[in-house]
Image (cartoon, rainbow, N blue to C red):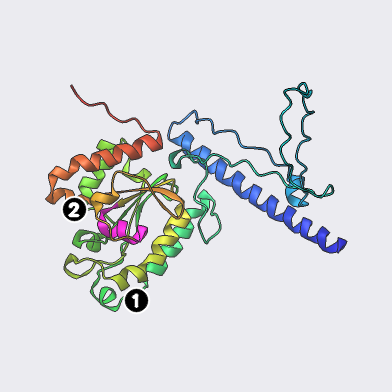
């Protein structure tokens, strides 16, 4: 029994050290990302109760603090009747109820997502990992119709260490011809949203789609097509590990949030995808057809900018 307990404690120590190293890597990556973005100060997180490592590893039962000395009894004439006391065994050892830690807001999280299946990839190794995945995508024939009709697959564009990732629906004719997402009219509007609206460079964000092949006649992706292609997108997110996601259009939002709600009900608030804070907003192609919706899309981008610590332009006048 003693040897089993010692082995369990050793395994717990190994798990603790591995988790500690993983967190150190992610903190370092996060701080480097913030430094590149010009962020010098971080908000102070609420204090959390300290739990000694030994108490976790050895499963020690922590005794509650001793009860304070009772106050002197009042005079006999005014002394109240004693309240009945619960019967307890003198040798019973009880664990104090843990103090719940306050939840940090999504936008203030220092760490990356914690719901990934694959291990963390160092930033320097991400370009090579994405290149291998792009080769796999280029040879995909899971959707026979799309594989037969495409000119080429459209993998992604942008930085493999981006803080922000945009996810659209599927390539169009221009994208199918050149192999780069969002380069047609809708792509130009997205570029303007990134550069003129948010004050970022397009090469500093990461842009991808649900589908990597153009559907014939630019039709909506079919459910089985989205299902076949989703593992590739999931792997892209796992490799890049962005801090924020922007879901463009109802197809992207519905697929990643697993919902049939309208964009009007999804936009304007935060969601989570693989633990990553995400917003949903109108697709640039929709904005070209419905210019009145640009106001709502700009409000969504401002919400995202505030969370990222970017400067939101003041209204003129």
Q: Residue at x 78, y 28 (%)?
A: 70
The quarter of the picture where the C terminus appears is top left
Looking at the picture, how far across and down is residue 263, in whole percent? 25, 52
Give the SS element for disc 2: helix
For the point 13% across and 45% down, the residue is: 291
Q: Is residue 137 above or below residue 166?
A: below
Image coords of residue 144 (percent x, y): 29, 78
Disc 2 and disc 1: Cα gap in Å?
A: 27 Å
Which disc is residue 241 wearing?
Answer: none
Q: Quadrant of the N terminus?
A: bottom right
Q: Which mark is residue 285?
A: 2
Residue drawn at 32 percent across, 60 percent down: 259
The mark total stands at: 2
Disc 1 crowd, CA 10 A, few/some/many (<14, 14-19, 20+): few
Q: Kindly check if marks 2 and 1 are in contact, taking CB atoms under 8 A apart as contact.
A: no
Question: Is residue 282 visible to the viewer in this orientation of the structure?
Answer: no
Of tags 2 and 1, the one toward the viewer is 2
The residue that appears at 72% across and 41% down in the rendered structure is: 84
Read off the residue under disc 1: 141
Specify the farthest residue to the front. 77
Q: Position of residue 42 (x, y in %)?
A: 50, 31
* Foreground residue among 4 and 18: 4
Q: Which residues are magenta?
A: 248-258
Residue 7: quarter of image = bottom right
Task: Judge whether residue 257 can be spotted in this image.
Answer: yes
Label 2 packing within 10 angstroms: few (<14), some (14-19), many (20+): some
Magenta-drawn stretch, dominant element (helix, strand or loop): helix
Of residues 100 and 295, the one nearer the viewer is: 100
In this view, which residue lies farthest toward the right?
2
Asked if residue 149 lies left or right of residue 14, the reply is: left
């Amino acid at each position: 029994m003693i040897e089993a307990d010692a082995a369990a404690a050793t395994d717990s120590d190994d798990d603790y050290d591995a988790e500690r190293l993983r967190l150190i890597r992610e903190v370092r990556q996060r701080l480097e990302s913030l430094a590149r973005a010009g962020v010098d100060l971080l908000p102070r997180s609420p204090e959390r109760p300290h739990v000694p490592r030994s108490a976790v590893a050895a499963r020690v039962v922590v005794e509650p603090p001793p009860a304070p000395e009772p106050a002197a009894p009042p005079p006999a004439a005014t002394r109240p009747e004693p309240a009945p006391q619960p019967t307890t065994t003198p040798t019973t050892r009880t664990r104090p109820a843990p103090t719940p830690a306050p939840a940090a807001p999504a936008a203030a999280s220092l760490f990356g997502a914690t719901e990934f299946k694959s291990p963390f990839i160092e930033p320097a190794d991400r370009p090579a990992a994405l290149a291998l995945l792009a080769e796999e995508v280029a040879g995909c024939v899971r959707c026979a119709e799309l594989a037969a009709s495409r000119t080429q697959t459209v993998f992604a564009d942008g930085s493999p260490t981006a803080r922000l990732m945009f996810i659209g629906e599927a390539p169009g004719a221009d994208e199918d011809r050149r192999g780069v997402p969002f380069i047609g009219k809708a792509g130009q509007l997205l570029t303007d949203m990134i550069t003129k609206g948010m004050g970022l460079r397009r090469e500093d964000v990461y842009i991808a789609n649900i589908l990597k092949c153009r559907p014939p006649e630019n039709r909506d992706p079919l459910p089985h097509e989205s299902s076949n292609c989703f593992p590739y997108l999931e792997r892209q997110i796992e490799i890049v590990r962005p801090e924020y996601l922007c879901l463009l259009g109802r197809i992207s939002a519905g697929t990643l949030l697993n919902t049939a709600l309208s964009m009007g009900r999804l936009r304007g608030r935060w969601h989570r995808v693989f633990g990553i804070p995400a917003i949903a907003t109108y697709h640039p192609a929709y904005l070209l057809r419905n210019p009145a919706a640009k106001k709502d899309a700009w409000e969504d981008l401002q919400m995202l900018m505030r969370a990222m610590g970017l400067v939101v332009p003041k209204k003129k006048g």
